[in-house]
Image (cartoon, rainbow, N blue to C red):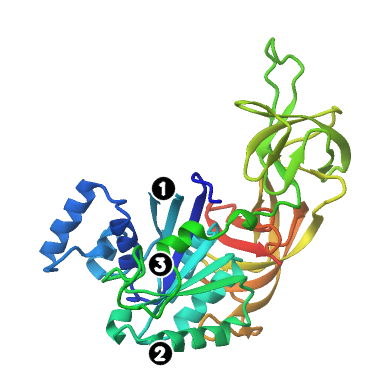
Amino acid sequence: MIDNNQLLRFTTAGSVDDGKSTLIGRLLYDSKSIFEDQLEAIEKTSKKKGHEGVDLALFTDGLRDEREQGITIDVAYRYFTTPKRKFIIADTPGHVEYTRNMVTGASTANAAIILVDARHGVIEQTRRHAFIASLLQIPHILVCINKMDLVNYSEDAYNKVIDQFEEFSSKLLVKDVRFIPISALEGDNVVNRSTNMEWYQGAPLLHTLETVHISSDVNKIDARFPVQTVLRPQNDSHRDYRGYAGRVASGVLRTGDEVTVLPSGFTSKIKSIDTFDGALEEAFAPMSISISLEDDIDVSRGNMIVRSNNKPEVVQDIEVMLCWLNKTSSKPREKYTIYHTSNSETAMIKELIYKIDMKTLERNTNDDTLNMNDICKVKIRTTKPLMIDSYRENRTTGSIILVNDSTNETVAAGMIV
Protein backbone atom coordinates (compact mmCIF):
# COMPACT_ATOMS: atom_id res chain seq x y z
CA MET A 1 0.00 0.00 0.00
CA ILE A 2 1.33 3.47 -0.96
CA ASP A 3 1.19 6.28 1.60
CA ASN A 4 -0.59 9.18 -0.10
CA ASN A 5 1.61 11.68 1.71
CA GLN A 6 4.84 9.85 0.92
CA LEU A 7 7.47 12.06 -0.69
CA LEU A 8 9.64 10.71 -3.48
CA ARG A 9 12.70 12.69 -4.51
CA PHE A 10 14.13 11.84 -7.90
CA THR A 11 16.86 13.25 -10.08
CA THR A 12 17.20 13.25 -13.84
CA ALA A 13 20.50 12.75 -15.61
CA GLY A 14 21.78 12.02 -19.08
CA SER A 15 23.84 13.54 -21.83
CA VAL A 16 23.15 16.94 -23.36
CA ASP A 17 20.09 16.91 -25.64
CA ASP A 18 18.91 13.50 -24.44
CA GLY A 19 15.64 15.22 -23.50
CA LYS A 20 15.73 15.55 -19.70
CA SER A 21 13.97 18.91 -19.56
CA THR A 22 11.42 17.80 -22.17
CA LEU A 23 10.71 14.66 -20.15
CA ILE A 24 10.07 16.65 -16.96
CA GLY A 25 7.92 19.11 -18.92
CA ARG A 26 5.93 16.15 -20.29
CA LEU A 27 5.50 14.69 -16.77
CA LEU A 28 4.21 18.02 -15.44
CA TYR A 29 2.06 18.74 -18.52
CA ASP A 30 0.38 15.32 -18.83
CA SER A 31 -0.17 14.96 -15.07
CA LYS A 32 -1.90 18.40 -15.08
CA SER A 33 0.66 19.83 -12.62
CA ILE A 34 1.17 23.20 -14.35
CA PHE A 35 -0.64 26.41 -13.42
CA GLU A 36 -2.57 28.15 -16.19
CA ASP A 37 -0.46 31.33 -16.03
CA GLN A 38 2.75 29.23 -16.33
CA LEU A 39 1.30 27.44 -19.32
CA GLU A 40 0.32 30.73 -21.00
CA ALA A 41 3.82 32.18 -20.45
CA ILE A 42 5.47 29.06 -21.92
CA GLU A 43 3.06 29.06 -24.90
CA LYS A 44 4.02 32.70 -25.64
CA THR A 45 7.75 31.93 -25.38
CA SER A 46 7.32 28.85 -27.61
CA LYS A 47 5.55 30.98 -30.28
CA LYS A 48 8.33 33.58 -30.15
CA LYS A 49 10.87 30.83 -30.78
CA GLY A 50 8.86 29.61 -33.75
CA HIS A 51 7.72 26.27 -32.26
CA GLU A 52 4.41 24.89 -33.51
CA GLY A 53 3.35 23.43 -30.13
CA VAL A 54 4.42 23.98 -26.54
CA ASP A 55 8.18 23.64 -25.95
CA LEU A 56 7.96 21.40 -22.87
CA ALA A 57 11.63 21.92 -21.96
CA LEU A 58 10.89 25.54 -21.02
CA PHE A 59 9.03 24.36 -17.89
CA THR A 60 12.34 23.39 -16.30
CA ASP A 61 15.02 25.48 -18.03
CA GLY A 62 14.42 28.32 -15.59
CA LEU A 63 17.67 30.25 -15.93
CA ARG A 64 17.81 32.83 -18.70
CA ASP A 65 21.21 31.49 -19.84
CA GLU A 66 19.67 28.06 -20.18
CA ARG A 67 16.75 29.31 -22.23
CA GLU A 68 19.10 31.21 -24.53
CA GLN A 69 21.54 28.32 -24.95
CA GLY A 70 18.94 25.55 -24.76
CA ILE A 71 20.94 23.66 -22.11
CA THR A 72 20.57 23.04 -18.38
CA ILE A 73 23.46 24.48 -16.36
CA ASP A 74 22.10 24.51 -12.81
CA VAL A 75 20.00 22.18 -10.70
CA ALA A 76 16.35 23.10 -11.28
CA TYR A 77 13.94 21.82 -8.61
CA ARG A 78 10.32 21.20 -9.48
CA TYR A 79 7.46 20.00 -7.27
CA PHE A 80 4.31 18.17 -8.24
CA THR A 81 1.70 15.93 -6.67
CA THR A 82 -0.49 13.09 -7.90
CA PRO A 83 -3.26 11.37 -5.90
CA LYS A 84 -0.72 8.70 -4.92
CA ARG A 85 2.47 10.65 -4.06
CA LYS A 86 4.29 13.95 -3.71
CA PHE A 87 7.38 14.48 -5.84
CA ILE A 88 10.47 16.69 -5.86
CA ILE A 89 12.42 16.61 -9.12
CA ALA A 90 16.05 17.71 -9.36
CA ASP A 91 16.80 18.38 -13.04
CA THR A 92 20.59 18.17 -13.15
CA PRO A 93 23.02 19.25 -15.89
CA GLY A 94 24.47 16.86 -18.43
CA HIS A 95 27.87 18.47 -19.06
CA VAL A 96 30.98 17.02 -17.41
CA GLU A 97 31.93 20.48 -16.10
CA TYR A 98 28.74 20.49 -13.99
CA THR A 99 29.42 17.16 -12.24
CA ARG A 100 29.20 18.92 -8.85
CA ASN A 101 25.64 20.07 -9.66
CA MET A 102 24.61 16.47 -10.34
CA VAL A 103 26.16 15.32 -7.06
CA THR A 104 24.26 18.08 -5.23
CA GLY A 105 20.94 17.29 -6.89
CA ALA A 106 21.24 13.53 -6.48
CA SER A 107 22.49 13.40 -2.89
CA THR A 108 19.01 13.11 -1.32
CA ALA A 109 17.25 11.26 -4.17
CA ASN A 110 15.29 8.02 -3.77
CA ALA A 111 15.48 7.38 -7.51
CA ALA A 112 17.49 8.48 -10.54
CA ILE A 113 16.12 8.72 -14.06
CA ILE A 114 18.96 8.26 -16.53
CA LEU A 115 18.03 9.18 -20.08
CA VAL A 116 19.60 7.43 -23.04
CA ASP A 117 19.05 8.48 -26.66
CA ALA A 118 17.77 5.36 -28.44
CA ARG A 119 19.73 6.36 -31.57
CA HIS A 120 23.10 6.71 -29.82
CA GLY A 121 22.86 4.10 -27.08
CA VAL A 122 25.01 4.10 -23.95
CA ILE A 123 27.73 6.75 -24.21
CA GLU A 124 30.48 8.05 -21.92
CA GLN A 125 28.14 10.50 -20.18
CA THR A 126 25.60 7.71 -19.47
CA ARG A 127 28.30 5.63 -17.78
CA ARG A 128 29.47 8.68 -15.80
CA HIS A 129 25.97 9.46 -14.49
CA ALA A 130 25.27 5.81 -13.64
CA PHE A 131 28.60 5.73 -11.76
CA ILE A 132 27.67 8.87 -9.75
CA ALA A 133 24.21 7.42 -9.00
CA SER A 134 25.91 4.24 -7.75
CA LEU A 135 28.45 6.25 -5.73
CA LEU A 136 25.62 8.22 -4.07
CA GLN A 137 23.82 4.94 -3.29
CA ILE A 138 20.60 6.00 -5.02
CA PRO A 139 18.41 2.92 -4.39
CA HIS A 140 16.42 2.90 -7.65
CA ILE A 141 17.66 3.66 -11.17
CA LEU A 142 15.15 4.06 -14.00
CA VAL A 143 16.84 3.97 -17.40
CA CYS A 144 14.51 5.80 -19.79
CA ILE A 145 15.40 4.98 -23.38
CA ASN A 146 14.15 8.18 -25.05
CA LYS A 147 13.40 9.27 -28.62
CA MET A 148 11.91 5.87 -29.49
CA ASP A 149 9.82 7.72 -32.10
CA LEU A 150 13.07 8.41 -34.02
CA VAL A 151 13.90 4.67 -34.26
CA ASN A 152 10.37 3.70 -35.33
CA TYR A 153 9.60 2.36 -31.83
CA SER A 154 11.96 -0.55 -32.51
CA GLU A 155 12.13 -3.28 -29.83
CA ASP A 156 15.60 -4.25 -31.15
CA ALA A 157 16.92 -0.70 -30.53
CA TYR A 158 15.50 -0.89 -26.98
CA ASN A 159 17.07 -4.28 -26.27
CA LYS A 160 20.41 -3.14 -27.67
CA VAL A 161 20.57 -0.26 -25.13
CA ILE A 162 19.64 -2.66 -22.29
CA ASP A 163 22.51 -4.98 -23.26
CA GLN A 164 24.96 -2.05 -23.42
CA PHE A 165 23.87 -0.69 -20.02
CA GLU A 166 23.88 -4.06 -18.24
CA GLU A 167 27.36 -4.83 -19.57
CA PHE A 168 28.96 -2.09 -17.48
CA SER A 169 26.35 -1.65 -14.69
CA SER A 170 27.10 -5.15 -13.39
CA LYS A 171 30.24 -3.62 -11.84
CA LEU A 172 28.25 -0.92 -10.03
CA LEU A 173 26.60 -1.17 -6.61
CA VAL A 174 23.02 -0.67 -7.75
CA LYS A 175 20.15 -2.62 -6.20
CA ASP A 176 17.25 -1.89 -8.53
CA VAL A 177 17.55 -1.01 -12.26
CA ARG A 178 14.49 -0.75 -14.53
CA PHE A 179 14.25 0.05 -18.24
CA ILE A 180 11.40 2.01 -19.85
CA PRO A 181 11.15 2.86 -23.59
CA ILE A 182 9.72 6.39 -23.98
CA SER A 183 9.27 9.37 -26.24
CA ALA A 184 9.26 12.50 -24.09
CA LEU A 185 8.32 14.65 -27.07
CA GLU A 186 5.33 12.53 -28.13
CA GLY A 187 4.39 11.39 -24.60
CA ASP A 188 4.81 7.63 -25.14
CA ASN A 189 5.09 5.72 -21.81
CA VAL A 190 5.69 8.90 -19.78
CA VAL A 191 2.30 9.36 -18.09
CA ASN A 192 0.17 7.28 -20.42
CA ARG A 193 0.90 3.83 -21.84
CA SER A 194 2.10 3.94 -25.45
CA THR A 195 0.02 2.40 -28.23
CA ASN A 196 3.12 2.45 -30.46
CA MET A 197 5.03 -0.11 -28.33
CA GLU A 198 2.66 -3.00 -27.68
CA TRP A 199 5.74 -5.22 -27.17
CA TYR A 200 6.58 -3.37 -23.93
CA GLN A 201 4.64 -4.97 -21.08
CA GLY A 202 5.93 -2.78 -18.22
CA ALA A 203 4.35 0.28 -16.61
CA PRO A 204 4.76 3.89 -17.85
CA LEU A 205 7.25 6.13 -16.04
CA LEU A 206 4.77 7.99 -13.79
CA HIS A 207 3.14 4.78 -12.61
CA THR A 208 6.59 3.36 -11.80
CA LEU A 209 7.46 6.51 -9.80
CA GLU A 210 4.13 6.30 -7.95
CA THR A 211 4.53 2.64 -6.97
CA VAL A 212 8.27 2.06 -6.48
CA HIS A 213 8.81 0.89 -2.90
CA ILE A 214 10.85 3.48 -0.99
CA SER A 215 9.91 2.79 2.65
CA SER A 216 12.80 0.35 3.02
CA ASP A 217 15.30 2.92 1.62
CA VAL A 218 15.65 4.43 5.12
CA ASN A 219 17.89 2.59 7.61
CA LYS A 220 15.46 1.34 10.29
CA ILE A 221 18.01 -0.72 12.24
CA ASP A 222 20.71 1.68 13.47
CA ALA A 223 19.15 4.20 15.87
CA ARG A 224 20.99 7.52 15.47
CA PHE A 225 19.85 10.79 17.04
CA PRO A 226 22.21 13.78 16.49
CA VAL A 227 21.42 16.44 19.11
CA GLN A 228 20.76 19.88 17.61
CA THR A 229 19.93 21.86 20.74
CA VAL A 230 19.13 21.50 24.44
CA LEU A 231 15.65 22.64 25.54
CA ARG A 232 15.30 24.22 29.01
CA PRO A 233 11.90 26.04 29.01
CA GLN A 234 12.09 27.05 32.72
CA ASN A 235 8.37 27.83 32.78
CA ASP A 236 5.79 26.83 35.38
CA SER A 237 4.60 23.71 33.59
CA HIS A 238 8.12 22.54 32.66
CA ARG A 239 10.20 23.80 35.57
CA ASP A 240 12.78 20.97 35.56
CA TYR A 241 12.43 19.84 31.95
CA ARG A 242 15.67 19.17 30.04
CA GLY A 243 15.12 17.89 26.51
CA TYR A 244 17.47 17.16 23.65
CA ALA A 245 15.97 18.26 20.35
CA GLY A 246 16.88 17.09 16.87
CA ARG A 247 15.87 14.88 13.98
CA VAL A 248 16.06 11.09 14.06
CA ALA A 249 18.67 10.24 11.41
CA SER A 250 17.84 6.53 11.26
CA GLY A 251 16.36 3.66 13.21
CA VAL A 252 13.64 3.65 15.87
CA LEU A 253 13.80 5.00 19.44
CA ARG A 254 11.32 4.02 22.17
CA THR A 255 10.70 5.20 25.72
CA GLY A 256 12.58 2.93 28.12
CA ASP A 257 15.36 2.17 25.62
CA GLU A 258 18.84 2.05 27.12
CA VAL A 259 20.91 4.63 25.24
CA THR A 260 24.48 5.90 25.16
CA VAL A 261 25.49 9.51 24.58
CA LEU A 262 28.53 9.83 22.29
CA PRO A 263 31.36 10.75 22.38
CA SER A 264 31.26 10.82 26.24
CA GLY A 265 29.97 7.24 26.57
CA PHE A 266 27.51 8.05 29.41
CA THR A 267 24.47 5.75 29.48
CA SER A 268 20.87 6.33 30.51
CA LYS A 269 17.31 5.38 29.54
CA ILE A 270 14.82 7.37 27.47
CA LYS A 271 12.33 8.92 29.89
CA SER A 272 10.07 10.58 27.29
CA ILE A 273 9.84 11.38 23.58
CA ASP A 274 8.11 14.72 23.05
CA THR A 275 6.82 16.56 19.98
CA PHE A 276 4.85 19.76 19.39
CA ASP A 277 1.68 17.64 19.26
CA GLY A 278 2.39 15.70 22.46
CA ALA A 279 4.35 12.74 23.81
CA LEU A 280 5.07 9.58 21.82
CA GLU A 281 5.99 6.04 22.77
CA GLU A 282 8.34 5.71 19.79
CA ALA A 283 9.95 7.83 17.09
CA PHE A 284 11.64 6.94 13.81
CA ALA A 285 13.48 8.65 10.96
CA PRO A 286 13.01 11.38 9.81
CA MET A 287 10.86 12.67 12.72
CA SER A 288 11.81 15.84 14.63
CA ILE A 289 11.52 15.20 18.35
CA SER A 290 12.82 16.07 21.81
CA ILE A 291 14.19 13.31 24.06
CA SER A 292 14.46 13.52 27.85
CA LEU A 293 16.63 11.05 29.76
CA GLU A 294 16.17 9.50 33.20
CA ASP A 295 19.64 10.65 34.33
CA ASP A 296 20.93 14.21 34.39
CA ILE A 297 24.02 13.84 32.21
CA ASP A 298 25.97 16.33 30.12
CA VAL A 299 24.59 16.41 26.56
CA SER A 300 25.15 19.23 24.07
CA ARG A 301 24.81 20.07 20.37
CA GLY A 302 26.92 17.77 18.21
CA ASN A 303 26.53 14.79 20.57
CA MET A 304 24.71 11.70 19.34
CA ILE A 305 22.23 9.56 21.26
CA VAL A 306 22.33 5.91 20.15
CA ARG A 307 21.17 2.55 21.46
CA SER A 308 23.77 1.11 23.84
CA ASN A 309 23.94 -2.21 21.93
CA ASN A 310 24.32 -0.58 18.49
CA LYS A 311 26.89 2.17 18.22
CA PRO A 312 28.53 3.99 15.30
CA GLU A 313 32.29 4.25 14.99
CA VAL A 314 33.87 7.08 16.98
CA VAL A 315 36.96 8.09 14.98
CA GLN A 316 39.23 10.98 14.03
CA ASP A 317 40.64 9.43 10.82
CA ILE A 318 38.08 8.78 8.10
CA GLU A 319 38.23 7.72 4.45
CA VAL A 320 35.84 9.67 2.25
CA MET A 321 34.78 9.75 -1.41
CA LEU A 322 34.90 13.50 -1.99
CA CYS A 323 33.44 15.69 -4.73
CA TRP A 324 35.30 18.99 -4.94
CA LEU A 325 32.76 21.80 -5.44
CA ASN A 326 34.96 24.89 -5.38
CA LYS A 327 36.74 26.85 -8.13
CA THR A 328 39.84 27.12 -5.91
CA SER A 329 41.99 23.99 -5.75
CA SER A 330 42.75 22.36 -2.42
CA LYS A 331 46.02 23.27 -0.73
CA PRO A 332 48.18 20.73 1.15
CA ARG A 333 47.40 20.55 4.91
CA GLU A 334 44.89 23.40 4.67
CA LYS A 335 42.40 23.45 7.56
CA TYR A 336 38.66 23.20 6.92
CA THR A 337 35.54 22.96 9.05
CA ILE A 338 33.94 19.56 8.62
CA TYR A 339 30.16 19.40 9.13
CA HIS A 340 28.72 16.00 10.02
CA THR A 341 25.08 15.74 11.16
CA SER A 342 24.77 18.48 13.85
CA ASN A 343 28.49 18.41 14.64
CA SER A 344 31.29 20.62 13.33
CA GLU A 345 35.03 20.22 13.90
CA THR A 346 38.29 21.39 12.35
CA ALA A 347 39.76 18.97 9.81
CA MET A 348 42.38 18.63 7.11
CA ILE A 349 42.88 16.36 4.10
CA LYS A 350 45.79 14.13 5.11
CA GLU A 351 46.13 12.15 1.89
CA LEU A 352 44.63 11.97 -1.59
CA ILE A 353 44.46 8.22 -2.29
CA TYR A 354 43.19 8.38 -5.88
CA LYS A 355 41.08 10.47 -8.24
CA ILE A 356 38.39 9.12 -10.54
CA ASP A 357 39.03 9.90 -14.19
CA MET A 358 35.49 11.02 -15.07
CA LYS A 359 36.03 10.16 -18.76
CA THR A 360 37.17 6.56 -18.28
CA LEU A 361 35.98 6.01 -14.65
CA GLU A 362 39.44 4.60 -13.89
CA ARG A 363 41.48 5.42 -10.78
CA ASN A 364 44.31 7.92 -11.14
CA THR A 365 46.91 7.69 -8.36
CA ASN A 366 49.42 10.11 -9.91
CA ASP A 367 47.50 13.39 -9.66
CA ASP A 368 47.33 14.91 -6.16
CA THR A 369 45.59 18.21 -6.97
CA LEU A 370 41.88 18.72 -6.31
CA ASN A 371 40.02 20.88 -8.82
CA MET A 372 36.35 21.71 -9.30
CA ASN A 373 34.18 18.67 -10.22
CA ASP A 374 36.90 16.18 -9.25
CA ILE A 375 35.74 13.05 -7.45
CA CYS A 376 38.38 11.33 -5.34
CA LYS A 377 39.06 9.14 -2.34
CA VAL A 378 40.85 10.94 0.53
CA LYS A 379 41.87 10.46 4.15
CA ILE A 380 40.63 13.20 6.49
CA ARG A 381 41.86 13.86 10.04
CA THR A 382 39.62 15.73 12.50
CA THR A 383 40.62 17.50 15.72
CA LYS A 384 37.90 15.71 17.72
CA PRO A 385 36.17 12.36 17.08
CA LEU A 386 33.09 12.07 14.85
CA MET A 387 30.35 9.45 15.27
CA ILE A 388 30.16 7.90 11.82
CA ASP A 389 28.58 5.11 9.79
CA SER A 390 29.52 4.19 6.25
CA TYR A 391 27.48 6.06 3.62
CA ARG A 392 26.33 2.73 2.18
CA GLU A 393 24.64 1.86 5.49
CA ASN A 394 23.38 5.32 6.44
CA ARG A 395 23.23 8.28 4.07
CA THR A 396 22.70 10.78 6.93
CA THR A 397 25.49 9.77 9.33
CA GLY A 398 27.71 8.75 6.41
CA SER A 399 27.91 12.14 4.70
CA ILE A 400 30.03 15.23 5.38
CA ILE A 401 30.72 18.66 3.90
CA LEU A 402 33.91 20.71 4.09
CA VAL A 403 33.81 24.50 4.47
CA ASN A 404 36.70 26.92 3.93
CA ASP A 405 37.11 28.88 7.19
CA SER A 406 38.46 32.04 5.58
CA THR A 407 35.86 32.40 2.78
CA ASN A 408 32.97 30.45 4.40
CA GLU A 409 32.45 28.64 1.09
CA THR A 410 31.41 24.99 0.91
CA VAL A 411 34.37 23.43 -0.91
CA ALA A 412 33.50 19.71 -0.91
CA ALA A 413 30.81 17.13 -0.18
CA GLY A 414 31.78 13.64 0.84
CA MET A 415 30.55 10.10 1.45
CA ILE A 416 32.25 8.12 4.21
CA VAL A 417 33.62 4.82 2.90
Give the image location of residue 71, x and y in percent.
31, 70
Q: Is residue 215 shown above or below 161?
A: above
Residue that badge 1 annotates: 83
Q: Is residue 97 shown above or below 239?
A: below
- Tell which residue pokes out farthest to the top in this image: 236
Quarter of the figure with residue 238? top right
Which dot marks residue 204? 3
Residue displayed at 31% across by 86% down = 151
Residue displayed at 11% across by 63% down = 48
Crowding around mark 3 (Cα neighbors within 10 Å: few <14, some 14 to 19, many 20+) is some
CA gap between label 3 and label 1 equals 16 Å
Give the image location of residue 397, x and y in percent.
69, 54
Q: Considering the numbered disc 1 on the image, is that residue within a helix, a strand or a loop?
A: loop
Give the image location of residue 23, x and y in percent.
34, 66
Residue that badge 2 annotates: 156
Pick the residue in front: 137 or 71: 137
The image quadrant where one finds the C terminus is: bottom right
> Going from the N terminus, do you reach mark 2 or mark 3 first?
2
Labelled pair 2, 1 in contact (Cβ < 8 Å): no
Give the image location of residue 100, x and y in percent.
49, 66
Residue 153 in the figure: left or right of residue 303: left
Q: Amino acid at mark 2?
A: Asp
Crowding around mark 1 (Cα neighbors within 10 Å: few <14, some 14 to 19, many 20+) is few
> Going from the N terminus, do you reach mark 3 or mark 1 first?
1
CA gap between label 2 and label 1 equals 35 Å
> Going from the N terminus, do you reach mark 2 or mark 1 first?
1
Residue displayed at 36% across by 69% down = 189
CA gap between label 2 and label 3 equals 19 Å
Residue displayed at 77% across by 37% down = 254
Q: Amino acid at mark 1?
A: Pro
Pick the residue in front: 396 or 43: 43
Q: Amino acid at mark 3?
A: Pro
